[in-house]
Image (cartoon, rainbow, N blue to C red):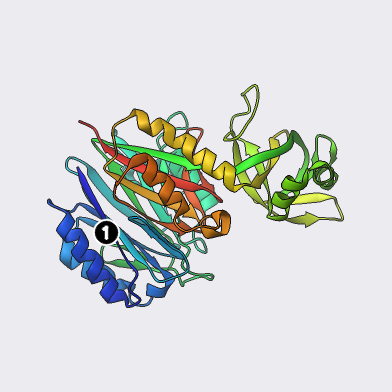
Amino acid sequence: MQSAAAISEHLDTRTAAIEVAALLENAMSGHVDLVFVFASFHHREALEEAIADIRQTLSPTTIIGVTTESVVGCDLELEGVAGLSAIAFNLPGTTLTPWTTTPKKPVPISRPDEIPNWIGLQEDTKAVFFFADPFSTPITRLLPALVNCRGKDKPLPIIGGMASGASQARYNRLFLDDQALRSGGVGLTISGPLELDCIVSQGCRPIGEHFRVTKVDGNVVLELGGKPALDVLQNLAKRADAKERDFLQGGLLLGGVIDENRSHFGRGDFLVRSILGIDRKRKGIAAGEFYRLGKTVQFHVRDPQTAVEDLQLLLDSQQLVKRPFAGLLVTCNGRGRSLFHEDDYDLNIIRERIGKVPIAGFFAAGEIGPIGGKSFLHGHTACLTLFRSIE
């Protein structure tokens, strides 16, 4: 199996596509089975023609394209500037099943027995890649349906992210071969002799104690451990040291425990969500999740040092297995320079640990990847998928 990645900073979309296609064509020695294309919003209007140019040059079996805020490729994280990044694969022996979901023809969530056929699920399916428009995709209902489509005891890995190339509906673009979508999502089910290892680095750390949710109304947590949630939060702020207060000013998050059966909880045991606001009248906290009564939660802060440690720790295990032949990086649009105050920070760490492996990806409006055996929609994470052949 083989891959190649290329990136262009050219502002003209067609020129960028021709440049990327030529680089990929020169690097690939065999038939191209799959190409992922990630384009910053600067390329939105001419991206359909650009995808066609890449298809004409490479003749891939499947090509998928997504508009984004910023792109990742090779050794660059091109934040806030024009960028077009792509990665091509030669995947002999694998089966690629592309599919779409749209508002007019959605994945049949209400008929879960039809989903395996819809997405081309097979006995040796390794994962599903899924990229979607956040304004038109019911991701909170769709994602669990996809994860559980082969049974709750055997969750299906879903990997990908939400298009970030627009701030309103119908301005994102998604492409699947000759189809161009302004809403919905595109998926690719991969089956066969391939190993996909997705690591999810959340870049947050717990602060204070963990509590049980003892009163809740929708997504508004009203009581934690029998006390008004806002009082708990204010007490946390009073007890915080100077460094922790700086982190609190940068934004507070709330994490729900993934596995309640654990005897103790630490970093990586929580699915972290943003705090959306405060209900002062009821002393509640509006969270980006619907927590049930009895759920264990803990406040978290974004911490660049923790983000680095977490990513390094997850990459440690990758040193014990053979080198991958490709990588796909889907990272939060709140990471990069805004978190680390340096360019290409995540990519530099990855390069130091796994070497010159072809990598492409994008800054997403929500990342999709597995934690604790199940895939979730994340924020503030870096999701790195490494591709290895099975010999």
Tell which of 37 and 221 is nearer to you: 37
Tell which of 212 and 206 is nearer to you: 206
Residue 41 in picture, x, y percent from top left: 43, 71
Residue 228 in picture, x, y percent from top left: 85, 43
Q: Is residue 59 visible?
A: no
Residue 277 in picture, x, y percent from top left: 74, 57
Residue appearing at x 72%, y 52% in the figure: 246
Is residue 22 depicted above or below 340 in this figure?
below
Picture quadrant of residue 194 = top left
User: Along the horizontal axis of the image, is 376 left or right of 54?
Assistant: right
Residue appearing at x 43%, y 45% in the figure: 349
User: Along the horizontal axis of the image, is 63 left or right of 353?
Assistant: left
Q: Pointer 1: residues within 10 angstroms few (<14), some, or many (20+)?
A: many
User: Dividing the image into 4 quarters, which one contains the C terminus?
Assistant: top left
Residue appearing at x 69%, y 35% in the figure: 295
Q: Label 1, on which residue?
A: 63
